[in-house]
Image (cartoon, coloured by chain):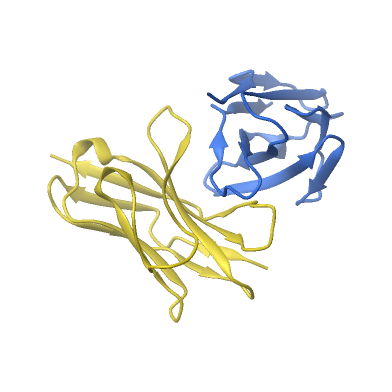
């Protein structure tokens, strides 16, 4: 069966510090991978998605970047965090053409 | 560009009463429509989806939704709710020819009271 792992679950970082959130998927090959963010009081927002290794599409211009160094690994990064980067980050995967998204457990990021 | 509107941020309802959670979308192309549920302290899970065919879609836990193309709506309904249905419900839309990236609404919190 397929599983998705996302870590850490919570993170408190000072403004200006770097960020690295990691997401891995097991039990499937060549998944579509996604990073979503849910800011306080707002809906889920798609940040990045990837249909293959090294293929990253950015949906929202921002302070964040994503990389996919391996087929089932998706990393969300920032060189210098801003206060506005605080929020709940969700990694997700889907089988291409399947439509159904499977989400990780999320990372609550607080930038202080 | 697509957008999804969930007009109600919170819907309080008594147990065993019927409920409707509203969802409207805008898109210039054909779309797939989804309802996701997020139970407290859990990740999102798919409740139901409309891809094609019958406009009345039945999902898990007794929920159903009806796709109305003329009104660009996809409202979620349940005839009798339980305490355990208390959760955040997200409507989402995806373009038919995209790589299934989803645009989510802001969510509706269903609060079921005894």
A80 horizontally vs A23: left or right: right
Shown colour of chain B: yellow
Mark count: 0
| Image coords of residue A11 (percent x, y) | 65, 20
Residue drawn 77% across the image and 23% down it:
A20
| Image coords of residue B109 (percent x, y) | 36, 47
Q: Nearer the viewer, residue A58 or A112?
A: A58
Q: Is residue B96 above or below residue A40?
A: below
Q: Is residue B93 above or below residue A62?
A: below
Shown colour of chain A: blue
B104 horizontally vs A65: left or right: left
A26 horizontally vs A62: left or right: left
B12 horizontally vs B105: left or right: left
Q: Is residue B92 above or below residue A8?
A: below
| Image coords of residue A9 (percent x, y) | 58, 20
Residue drawn 54% across the image and 26% down it:
A105
Viewport quadrant of the C terminus of chain A: top right
Residue drawn 22% across the image and 43% down it:
B112
| Image coords of residue A42 (percent x, y) | 55, 49
Q: Residue B58, located in which quarter of the rendered image? A: bottom left
């Amino acid at each position: 069966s397929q599983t998705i792992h996302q870590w850490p679950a919570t993170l408190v970082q000072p403004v200006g510090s770097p960020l690295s959130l990691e997401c891995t998927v097991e039990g499937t090959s060549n998944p579509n991978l996604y990073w979503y963010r849910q800011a306080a009081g707002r809906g889920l927002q798609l940040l990045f998605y990837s249909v293959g290794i090294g293929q990253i599409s950015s949906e929202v211009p921002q302070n964040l970047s994503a990389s996919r160094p391996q087929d089932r690994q998706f990393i969300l990064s920032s060189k210098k965090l801003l206060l506005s980067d605080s929020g709940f980050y969700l990694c997700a995967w889907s089988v291409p053409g399947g439509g159904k998204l499977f989400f990780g457990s999320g990372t609550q990021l607080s930038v202080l | 560009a697509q957008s999804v509107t969930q007009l109600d941020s919170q819907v309080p309802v008594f147990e065993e009463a019927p409920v409707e959670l509203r969802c409207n979308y805008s898109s210039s192309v054909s779309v797939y429509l989804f309802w996701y549920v997020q139970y407290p302290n859990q990740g999102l899970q798919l409740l139901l989806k409309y891809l094609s065919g019958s406009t009345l879609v039945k999902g898990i836990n007794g929920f159903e939704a009806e796709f109305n193309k003329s009104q660009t709506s996809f409202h979620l309904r349940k005839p009798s709710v339980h305490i355990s249905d208390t959760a955040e419900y997200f409507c989402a839309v995806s373009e038919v020819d995209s790589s299934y990236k989803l645009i989510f609404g802001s969510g509706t919190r269903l609060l079921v009271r005894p």
